[in-house]
Image (cartoon, rainbow, N blue to C red):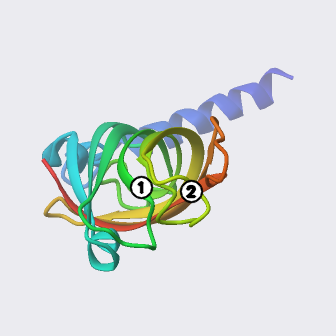
Amino acid sequence: MKKPLYYVLFLIGCFGAYAQQDDDGITKVEIVKDSSDEYADAFGSHEIRLNALDLVLYPTVHLYYERVLDQSNGYGISALANFGDNENTYQNFALTPYYRFYFLNRKDFGASGLFVEVFSSFVSANFHKFKSSSPNKDVFQFSMGIALGKKWVNRNGFSFEAFVGFGRYLNKIDNGADGHGRVGLAIGKRF
């Protein structure tokens, strides 16, 4: 019983001594750099975007500000201002705070990739533009909703995102809309 134990210890000792020796007596060490937070820190944690889709379709400016918390989370607010008398949109002004959860970050630029967004919206609306049977006055609406999208960030900190979502108005008014869409193609810069 003692003989096999001695053989095993002898073999372990021989292989251990052989593994530590090198031809020149130098042990080479390879350092692998983890750059998961490198780009997120290099770009900064603030981002401003413009929804180009709203600007092209309507005389509307829709700006976003996002604070990047880490690679997987961010929060922000968007502001929409309608400068025209377009029949296709009834929102005059909207403030929309949101929180995003990012998934599948293939390139670790921080807060990019697929995202799920939960939002609330505070809207000043005039449904007369949308439904002729509603009274011609501005009303205040509050909604809660969810959106899905994808964001790309390049090495210079420029971002592009596409998203679609829906919000349900919680204070339903007569002859008003039940909810609203949240659709966009936004371009921006992280700093």
Q: Is residue 5 left or right of residue 47?
A: right
* Quarter of the figure that contains the N terminus: top right
**Could you tell me if residue 139 is visible in this image?**
yes
> Type of residue at label 2?
His
Residue placed most toward the observer, 165 or 22: 165
Residue 69 in the image: above or below residue 87: above
Q: In the rendered image of this protein, does residue 184 appear above or below residue 77? A: below
* CB-based contact (under 8 Å), mark 1 and mark 2: yes
What is the secondary structure assignment of the residue under circle 1? strand
Which sits in the foreground, 167 or 115?
167
- Between the residue at mark 1 and the residue at mark 2, the CA separation in whole angstroms equals 10 Å
Precedes in sequence: disc 1 or disc 2: 1
Label 1: few (<14), some or many (≥20) within 10 Å? many
* Residue furthest out toward the right: 1
Who is closer to the viewer here, 126 or 142? 126
Res. 188 image quadrant: bottom left
Q: Look at mark 1 in the image and give the residue it sits on.
A: 91
User: Looking at the image, is mark 1 or mark 2 nearer the viewer?
Assistant: 1
Q: How many marks?
A: 2
Residue at 56%, 40% (x, y): give it: 143
Point out residue 157 in the picture as x, y percentages from the top left corner. 17, 59
Give the x, y percent position of residue 65.
25, 44
Placement of 73 over or under 111, stated as above or below: above
Binning the other alpha carbons within 10 Å of mark 2 as few (below 14), some (14 to 19) or many (20 upward) gives: some
Which residue bears the numbered disc 2? 180
> Is 1 on the left or on the right of 100, as rendered?
right
